[in-house]
């Protein structure tokens, strides 16, 4: 449940955002021609892209390249509340703020890696920077354009001063690189994760209906059936090794509850997963 959503606008963009929500919940982010910096003030968030999955804890930040993402607020404790600050970095806004940014980032393209997001380690300066943003979010009448421009410059300087500045600027350079979305690769990457069909469609930048049509055409079967079969085959292989418990297999195959996994396994194979382990042990 979303509890709070406040924002500051710069050059026509919702640039600085504070959001909080009661876990568990999921937010969907679509970044078209923009990157963003995402900082968790309190709680834990799991951030998913089409090819990556990162756990972002309290006082940690993450830089995201343009694309579609899922932010899952995790329930670390009962009634957990996750608070975060997002600073969006659209390409046209950065070009207004920084002279010759286009040429600088284009030079980085020769070293462009396939990276969609990068997590920054705890940094006291970044934490103090976020605290200064929170002040202006709570006092938007003081957040004049000239000041917000300075805050964006400050963020870029802080990111550039980290020990992974090359990684961050390589990631930002992809704002100027046209990329083809490999939807099949995204599907294969997430087929054993706890990602719903609706969430997977979002990562593929499609409506759920369009995604289902694409899936049927690509795999010749509905997504629910495909994922179910893939998970059952993986579960069978893992149990046959006698190295994993039923709970570990359920988790690896994307099931949150062991009871749901056991029921699905029994329906597919005709016997419980525990029986397979017993049979193979004898």
Image: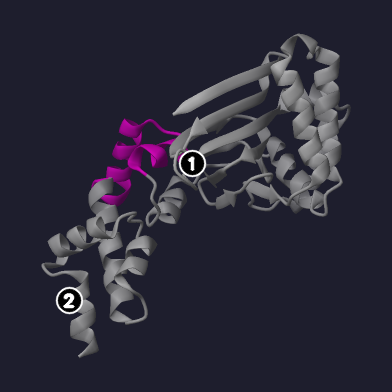
Where residue 214 sits: x, y (%)? Answer: 33, 40
Q: Disc 1 marks which residue?
A: 72
The residue under the point 41% across, 50% down is: 187
The residue under the point 79% across, 47% down is: 123
Q: Is residue 241 visible?
A: yes
Examine the residues drawn in magenta and state their main secondary structure: helix
Q: Secondary structure at mark 1?
A: strand
Q: Secondary structure at mark 2?
A: helix
Q: Residues within 10 Å of mark 1 (few under 14, many from 20)?
A: some
Q: Nearer the viewer, residue 93 or 251?
A: 251
Q: Residues within 10 Å of mark 2 (few under 14, many from 20)?
A: few
N-terminal label among 2 and 1: 1
Position of residue 255 in the picture relative to residue 262 (left or right): right
**Color theme of the render:** one colour
* Alpha carbons under labels 2 and 1: distance apart: 35 Å
In this view, the residue farthest toward the front is: 78
Q: Which residues are magenta?
A: 196-222
Q: Disc 2 marks which residue?
A: 275
Where residue 150 sits: x, y (%)? Answer: 86, 24
Q: Examine the rendered structure and indicate whether residue 232 appears above or below residue 137.
A: below
Q: How many marks?
A: 2
Q: Examine the rendered structure and indicate whether residue 91 appears above or below residue 191.
A: above
Asked if residue 197 is among those painted magenta in the image, a careful observer would answer yes
């Amino acid at each position: 449940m979303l509890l709070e959503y406040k924002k500051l606008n710069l050059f026509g963009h919702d640039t600085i955002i504070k959001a909080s929500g009661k876990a568990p919940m999921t937010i969907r982010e679509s970044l078209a021609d923009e990157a963003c910096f995402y900082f968790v003030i309190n709680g834990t968030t799991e951030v998913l892209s089409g090819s990556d999955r990162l756990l972002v804890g309290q006082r940690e930040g993450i830089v995201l390249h343009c694309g579609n993402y899922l932010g899952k607020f995790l329930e670390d404790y009962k009634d957990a509340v996750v608070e975060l600050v997002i600073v969006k970095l659209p390409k046209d806004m950065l070009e207004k703020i920084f002279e010759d940014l286009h040429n600088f980032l284009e030079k980085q393209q020769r070293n462009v890696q396939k990276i969609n997001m990068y997590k920054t380690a705890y940094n006291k300066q970044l934490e103090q920077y976020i605290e200064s943003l929170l002040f202006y979010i709570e006092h938007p009448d003081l957040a004049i354009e000239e000041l917000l421009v300075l805050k964006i410059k400050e963020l870029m300087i802080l990111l550039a001063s980290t020990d992974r500045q090359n990684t961050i600027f390589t990631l930002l350079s992809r704002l100027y690189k046209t990329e083809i979305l490999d939807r099949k690769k995204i599907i294969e990457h997430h087929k054993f994760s706890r990602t719903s069909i609706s969430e997977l469609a979002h990562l593929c930048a499609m409506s759920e209906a369009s995604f289902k049509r694409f899936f049927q055409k690509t795999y010749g079967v509905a997504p629910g059936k495909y994922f179910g079969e893939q998970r059952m085959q993986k579960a069978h292989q893992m149990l046959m090794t006698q190295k994993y418990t039923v709970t570990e297999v359920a988790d690896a195959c994307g099931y949150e509850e062991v009871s749901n996994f056991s029921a699905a396994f029994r329906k597919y194979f005709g016997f419980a997963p525990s029986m397979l382990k017993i049979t193979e042990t004898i």
